[in-house]
Amino acid sequence: MTEHELHPETKAIRAGRGDNDTALAPILWATTTFVTPTVAEGRKMATGIGSARFYSRYGNPTVAGFEDAIAQLEGAETARAFASGMGAISAVILGLCSTGDHIVAQRQLYAGTQLLLQTACPRFGIDVTFVDATEPGAFAAAVIPGRTTLVFAETPANPRLDLVDLDELGAIAGPMTVVDSTFATPLIQRPLDHGVDLVIHSATKAIAGHNDATLGVVAGAAELVDWLYSFAVLQGANASPFDALNGLRGLRTLGVRLERQSATAGVLARFLESHPATAEVRWPGLESHPQYELAQRQMRLPGGLLTFDLVGGIEAGVAFVEGLEIAQLATSLGGPETLVTHPASTTHVNLTPEELAANGISPGTVRVSTGLEHADDLVADFAQALERPAG
Ligand SMILES: *Cc1c(COP(=O)(O)O)cnc(C)c1O
């Protein structure tokens, strides 16, 4: 059996072990610098791409192990890790686009990405057009031939789990296509297999998976990632070796965590769908999801994220998230603890009411990141919190 034929869950156990010597667990290379044997070798490392033994802002063996693992899992030629998901996203956008360029992005985006596109890009003379990613052909229709350099997508998207058709995105000719695949992880979907050029993860989330590492990564063709590398070294948002170590640690259990979280999210989604206090429930594994067919086609598992609307609006949303006893009110996702967020009052608080509506966020929208607790305990917790009087 060749490495290529292995299941992703098996690859996640085997990947990124290059610099371990005989140690089973990854070695933490907690060093900022490396002794260079000769001036000539130092010069080569200072000017080359991806040196892992020169100075840790350029590269580091523990970080390189994590990068290799992600490249392998995504089927990419290479990968570059960053200090955070936003470090990766800002490197892609500001490292690959210049004054006069045009970006097509979707309206349904992680709020940090949206703010970067709306506030930083105009300052550098980069125009951005936002489209509805769920509308077939919307990305391609907004591309301006000769001017659009980047098409930026996120799927499943924050916070309503809208999906982007990866085949359609990958077929766009001309601009570079990029997918923020954080919610899916490489074990649920592989955008590069669909013809997309770069895939980004906030590994802070499910990949590191324990809410103890802030980490990002970009993977794709060497030509593009190497181009990004020169900018990244100057940007300085390099991944810390300790966080990369935790990224590798998280990858080993990612498969079982995603299976458990997907199963529990399904139990919660069906419970919420049948509850009179809720309006719409969004989870890619529910037949009622408007893009259920697409989810079946491009996702190996529905994932642990779900979003629902409370009919009681903002008061009901606040009462619910504050009334939970097992699930906790905290931003972030993909870890062992079930977390809830109330986007209208937290992550998306900087958006105008019109932008909130365009993002599909109502005052009563609640996002759930299912953890690893027993499903029955979570259902009981949600049931009691839904009974709490609002206000
Ligand atoms: C969290 C997140 C980011 C940003 O990642 P950080 O590690 O917090 O910088 C980007 N995209 C998505 C979809 C996210 O969930």
Image (cartoon, rainbow, N blue to C red):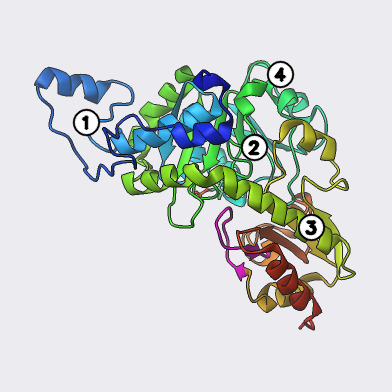
Q: Is residue 188 above or below residue 367?
A: above
Q: Earlier in the sequence, mark 3 or mark 4?
A: 4
Q: Tag 1's secondary structure? A: loop
Q: Amino acid type of disc 1? A: Phe
Q: Earlier in the sequence, mark 1 or mark 4?
A: 1
Q: Horizontally, is 21 left or right of 149 in the view?
A: left
Quadrant assignment for the C terminus: bottom right
Q: Check if mark 3's residue and mark 4's residue have beta carbons within 8 Å.
A: no
Q: Nearer the viewer, mark 3 or mark 4?
A: 3
Q: Nearer the viewer, mark 3 or mark 1?
A: 3
Q: Earlier in the sequence, mark 3 or mark 1?
A: 1
Q: Amino acid type of disc 4? A: Ala
Q: Tag 3's secondary structure? A: helix
Q: Nearer the viewer, mark 2 or mark 4?
A: 2
The residue to which callout 3 is attached is: 269
What whole-number distance in Å separates the C-alpha atoms at marks 1 and 2?
35 Å
**Residue shown at 84% from the left, 46% from the top:** 289
The residue to which callout 2 is attached is: 188
Residue 171 image label: 4
Q: Is residue 3 above or below residue 33?
A: above
Q: Tag 2's secondary structure? A: loop
Q: Amino acid type of disc 2? A: Ile
Q: Earlier in the sequence, mark 2 or mark 3?
A: 2
**Residue shown at 53% from the left, 33% from the top:** 10
What whole-number distance in Å separates the C-alpha atoms at marks 2 and 3?
19 Å
Circle 3 Cα neighbour tier, 10 Å, few/some/many (<14 / 14–19 / ≥20): many
x%, y% of residue 4? 54, 20
The residue to which callout 1 is attached is: 54
What whole-number distance in Å separates the C-alpha atoms at marks 3 and 4?
33 Å
- The boundaries of the magenta stretch are 328-342
Q: Tag 4's secondary structure? A: loop
